Amino acid sequence: MNWNKKTGNCKSIVPIIIIIVFILPTLHQSVFANHGKEIVLSSNDAQFFLVPGKNVQQIKVTTTYSVSDPTTVGKQISGTMKIYTTNGTLLKTTSIPNGFKAEKNGFQQFVTTLPNSTAQSITTIVLFTDLNKTAPFSNSITNKLVLNKTQ
């Protein structure tokens, strides 16, 4: 048997071993991470009201959060608030434009306005995400709000 043929086969195995040992664990961690469970989110206060003297309705949702994944603390993250009518039609999506730095525990407020409409009740869904707003970092919280009643 030719010695060069034997060592040639071994040379192709080395890169495979390197990939298995060093690269796959990193990919495994990012693929199988607990996306959507890094942060526990809850609603602190939610309001839907007419702004006095203006022809707009305002929605304000204040959330509290606790980071359960230590690698998320200090990361720049974002969040979205989606507003729906009672029949499920999406009225508006608003987000934190430049994101914010996640602390171990904290609060975040979402505020937006709608042109004054006949809507007497709405549903909001708030979710913390990555900075690109593509991967969830938290549970979502839902608030069913009635005009001029604080929840």
Image (cartoon, helix red, strand yellow):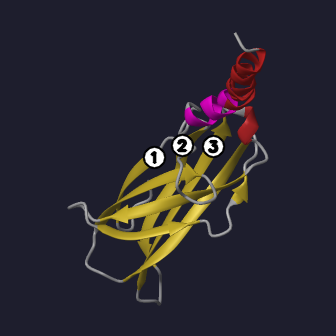
> Which residue is most to the top?
1
Which residue in the protein does label 2 denote?
Answer: 42
- At label 2, which amino acid type do we have? Ser
Q: Which residue is nearer to you in this view: 9 or 135?
A: 9
Lower position in the chain sequence, tag 1 or tag 2: 2
Q: Which segment did they paint magenta?
A: 24-31
Q: Is residue 61 above or below residue 102?
A: below
Instruction: Give SS at disc 1.
Output: strand
* Classed neighbour count for the residue bearing mark 3: other residues with Cα under 10 Å, few (<14), some (14–19), many (≥20): many
Lower position in the chain sequence, tag 1 or tag 3: 3
Q: Is residue 32 above or below residue 118?
A: above
Q: Position of residue 33 (x, y in %)?
A: 59, 32
* Classed neighbour count for the residue bearing mark 2: other residues with Cα under 10 Å, few (<14), some (14–19), many (≥20): some
Q: CA distance from mark 2 to mark 3?
A: 6 Å
Q: Is residue 87 above or below residue 39?
A: below
Looking at the rendering, which quadrant does residue 90 occupy?
bottom left
Instruction: Give SS at disc 2.
Output: strand
Q: Which mark is residue 65?
A: 3
Along the horizontal axis of the image, is 19 left or right of 92?
right
Which residue in the protein does label 1 denote?
Answer: 141
The secondary structure that dominates the magenta segment is helix
Is the C-beta separation of discs 2 and 3 under 8 Å?
yes
Is the C-beta separation of discs 1 and 2 under 8 Å?
yes
